[in-house]
Amino acid sequence: MKKIKVGIVGGTGYTGVELLRLLARHPNVQIQVITSRGEAGLPVADMFPSLRGGVKLAFSDPATVDLTQCDIVFFATPHGVAMRQTPALVAAGVKVIDLAADFRLQDAAEFEKWYKLPHDCMDILEKAVYGLPELYARDIAQAEVIGNPGCYPTTVLLGLAPLLEHGWIDYSAPIIADAKSGVSGAGRKAEVGTLFSESSDNLKAYGVAGHRHHPEILAQLKKLSGHNAVQLIFVPHLIPMIRGMLTTLHVKLNAEGKRQSLQSVYEQRYANDYFVDVMPAGALPETRSVRGANYLRLALYPQAADYVTIIVVQDNLVKGASGQAVQNMNLMFNLPVDTGLQILPLLP
Amino acid sequence: MKKIKVGIVGGTGYTGVELLRLLARHPNVQIQVITSRGEAGLPVADMFPSLRGGVKLAFSDPATVDLTQCDIVFFATPHGVAMRQTPALVAAGVKVIDLAADFRLQDAAEFEKWYKLPHDCMDILEKAVYGLPELYARDIAQAEVIGNPGCYPTTVLLGLAPLLEHGWIDYSAPIIADAKSGVSGAGRKAEVGTLFSESSDNLKAYGVAGHRHHPEILAQLKKLSGHNAVQLIFVPHLIPMIRGMLTTLHVKLNAEGKRQSLQSVYEQRYANDYFVDVMPAGALPETRSVRGANYLRLALYPQAADYVTIIVVQDNLVKGASGQAVQNMNLMFNLPVDTGLQILPLLP
Amino acid sequence: MKKIKVGIVGGTGYTGVELLRLLARHPNVQIQVITSRGEAGLPVADMFPSLRGGVKLAFSDPATVDLTQCDIVFFATPHGVAMRQTPALVAAGVKVIDLAADFRLQDAAEFEKWYKLPHDCMDILEKAVYGLPELYARDIAQAEVIGNPGCYPTTVLLGLAPLLEHGWIDYSAPIIADAKSGVSGAGRKAEVGTLFSESSDNLKAYGVAGHRHHPEILAQLKKLSGHNAVQLIFVPHLIPMIRGMLTTLHVKLNAEGKRQSLQSVYEQRYANDYFVDVMPAGALPETRSVRGANYLRLALYPQAADYVTIIVVQDNLVKGASGQAVQNMNLMFNLPVDTGLQILPLLP
Amino acid sequence: MKKIKVGIVGGTGYTGVELLRLLARHPNVQIQVITSRGEAGLPVADMFPSLRGGVKLAFSDPATVDLTQCDIVFFATPHGVAMRQTPALVAAGVKVIDLAADFRLQDAAEFEKWYKLPHDCMDILEKAVYGLPELYARDIAQAEVIGNPGCYPTTVLLGLAPLLEHGWIDYSAPIIADAKSGVSGAGRKAEVGTLFSESSDNLKAYGVAGHRHHPEILAQLKKLSGHNAVQLIFVPHLIPMIRGMLTTLHVKLNAEGKRQSLQSVYEQRYANDYFVDVMPAGALPETRSVRGANYLRLALYPQAADYVTIIVVQDNLVKGASGQAVQNMNLMFNLPVDTGLQILPLLP
């Protein structure tokens, strides 16, 4: 088979280097070009020594590169970059996966409110598909443009999807998502708050008054439930570990929900989803069980007061970002969904 | 003033060494004796090199020691030890503070259910006081025997006390305590699960199906609220940090609760409590802000659906254990509550 | 090609689970059996959740298993186990790679002195090959039994081999190996010293008065240099990280050594060694640049007083243990050396 | 006794907040003023929540503050700031302790070479005292201006002082200082290299080609030994822990040195130094044994080839910086050397 020609825009962040790690060993991919405004000319492996011997490319200047020769372009850039370049790529028949937020929120006003940027790519936004393969595989396979989901939304939505789809949640109570992320989720920006000396041996919540993933989750909760009054309490926490995300969901079941055997409902729902692991009753998912791999594992715990607690883990840089993007690419090019993603987690 | 003669039973765990750190510099204390069955004869500083130069004592054999010469004895032992030795000490006029669970639960049947031990010290249990100074200072001052609270219960109860005391919670919804603890909470036992290579760079929940602090919290919630049908969802998580505890509480307010300015209610409630810090609106408590010190800090966040989220931090080994025990001792000996506890947190 | 039938004895430690991670994705391998005395019957993935979906086997009882059906058996056991079982396996034509120390030291008296065990397998010891592929590839290809090197020796020996082979060291000065290892090197035994709360946010040296890798390194230094009076100061340190090893070597050059361009000497020496990366002058190797992968990277720094400092990094569980074992297996079965080992490091 | 009026210039870094932690509880100190150009007006406790309740001051604008009202001023500023302000303070009779490098190197040309700054305060430099109390207590007591030592030099010099003073080193071999520091040594600047995701679970050397502490150590080695040809190999490493420094020294003894019982020599040399702990033979110093405290612990190991290995630990922010500065202040104001510094280390 002819290799897929891949371009990566913005390869100097953590989602960028993670794309490189995965794509450099993907049997059907040829990485054509990686761009960086600030680092043009620098060999990629000089910035990321883990890629010495594995990636020979240097960063290219985005001003001089012709991305239309690619079959697909990944944007691992700040919010707002992809929407400016996507129209020309789509016009040239190039597929696009944006790992930032430009194509995640169908409601452009919401986007502008939370990201403080005008959305100047509305017609493409309308056709863009939310890239959560376990929910939208068929649309993804046909899509030209993918908005790759945020890391937190992936855990919340896959943790709740079976309940949402069946309509078994009591929406008079808020859904509570108490979420915890490793520090790599904050990216590779030089900031005091994520210095080792500030975030090691420490724990804090952040964004309690409003986090950008809140509207993204809420929009999908409404869509999947068909219920417009869903309420969400979302509290993210910063955990002193590099990778990993664990979301603890507390949900009230309605009368029908209470009658179900949720364990088997979940097992059936995800039986054909290669990357979703419904753990046995009583199991306790750990983030290290998915470190470096594209799996998402979850477990269910019945609680008092008709509540169920659902715990979901993933690697925020893989299933929460770059691995999911590659999974989307596989669907778009009609490859088996696990192609290039059969990496086993690193434990210990 | 004559010094308080202190005995410590079981000085080889983390609450033991923490008691030593605090008491060795307490201006009104003379540490008389530290016992350890396994380590009798060993200088304490040989086990804990941090105490070289600060603590000259060696561990004594509990079989040969006369603890009745002490004014007060701290038990930093496994559950079940204190209740066997306390009657003789009380008879000899020695005060007792137990850092284990022997005197935390007034309901002996509950104790036996959760700790798999018969409670053979019922008359003393009846007189024992739950050692949470911000709630029971007067009783503590008069007490002969203190059951020092668990670490998680301290955060939940001080986080909720103002609401419980005023009756402003809607008890038809469960109280949700999503709690996170550093690894030192698991103690200094050799176990695979708390090895560095198992718990570093990792995150998991544990005890979801039932944790021993659940009945302790619930008993106090009922007592403080006067409301017998309180329901509690309690999910503890293990965080890759040595010390520190952060508990995220999600509570539904009732009609009266909704009308209050909770920020000022909390500030007034704790205005005279030296160790409780109600942070300003919008602040985000961090565990490192209390590392090594006896403070407990909290902040309030109004949420959708008449919920309020309350975030509470403490050092699990200080306010959550040994510091709280010293605070109790201060009250029992009529000393200013912060005597020997004016240690500032270690940051970074 | 027919798959290699592999047996693993002792699969519950870190070198065991690491072998599983690597071999489960090795294209030429069929894992036949994994034994564990203590865990017979338990699915491997119940102990190591990272292997859920990747390894379907359960642990077998070593008493009931016939290992002679395997083509090769890896011993990931305590010292002393392999030497008892190897004679029968060799007699049956099964190849053996021992990840413990049973076949590392040709001098059985030295083995007995350091490991406090009689060596009762002397004839096989004589034929066993020290499994450092960059030094002994030809012998390994022919070997029936491999003593897989210790983690520290791998860094010291590959860091010094070009100098040793050329005879450019001034042996009147001791070779100083200031070595640093992540905590996983201590294994998955329940011990107080490697608890998270004991070894996180901490640094110490250990084994300064005598470490078992000292005689192993010294024997190889003598062999490679042909110089019996080599002296070695070896100081290992325990670093608060899970994986990774960095060894800082300080060596005095002799007159001939001083005249060389060591950078190019090293580059040429390792030009054909897929897993050894001589970094450019001035580079600073980091352990994360090899996390989870079989690379060993090194860099050279000329120093005052005719010394050269050589810094070597590897993942102690991969190139320092299980990856190296797989590399040896590839050589023994005439496969390309990197088969199944083309994993890129995990960064961040 | 009247309190010492203290000013702190540059209170927003780690040495600044550490000075505040120590001085806020010092019984003889009144903190008058803390300056910060960038944060003037901000309450100190808003930046460092650990100081809530402990430090009520806000940062002052350095342009509007009169520091001549202080008895002593600490500079916790970048290199070059203290030397500009010190002449006016000295003229006004204010004592000065600089925690940066302005007064560490007596040779101004060396300073300019390594710090890329002209030294425009030469007359004061001549009178400034190198603030290592265990070596220069008498001079410090008389000094107007103190150059507080760097963290690495403190470990190397106190580790070697007895040998240097007695002349027992064989200077034909280089002194090798293989040093390891926690990340807080890099300060509180926003930089990619010290992000949690870059430096956690990682180990690397840095500054191998030339570190600013090299000339500082070398100058003192020459002074203390009276031997101008001392050679030093200094390799610092970055350890994934917040605080703590461990330096491993490898030194060759001369004929006279070989005949000594170094253990008792060291014990006698430091018998009257409150903060230096010569550990018993065979002990292994750990950084956590000094966490948060002003102690420096060391141990000696005889080695092959007439070498001795000396391992030294300290908290880089306390004995390596701010604690040492307070110790110097105590000497300058004729207070017992441990005043305000009797803090026991935090373990675990």
Image (cartoon, coloured by chain):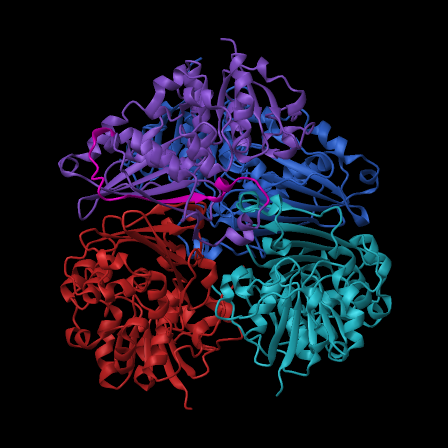
Chain colours: A red, B purple, C cyan, D blue
Quadrant in which the N terminus of chain C is drawn: bottom right
x 86%, y 69%: residue: C123
Image spot of residue A112 (x, y percent):
17, 62
| Left or right: A201 in relation to A237 | right
x 42%, y 74%: residue: A41
| Left or right: A93 in relation to B52 | left
User: Which residue is at the far bottom?
Assistant: A1
Image spot of residue C248 (x, y percent):
65, 57
Front residue (pair B290, D292): B290
Vertical arrangement, residue D344 with respect to residue A74, above or below: above
Can you tell which quarter of the image residue B20 is in?
A: top right
Can you tell which quarter of the image residue A269 is in?
A: bottom left
Looking at the rendering, the stretch of residues picked out in magenta corresponds to B165-190
In magenta segment, residue B186: yes
Image spot of residue A284 (x, y percent):
44, 55
In magenta segment, residue A46: no
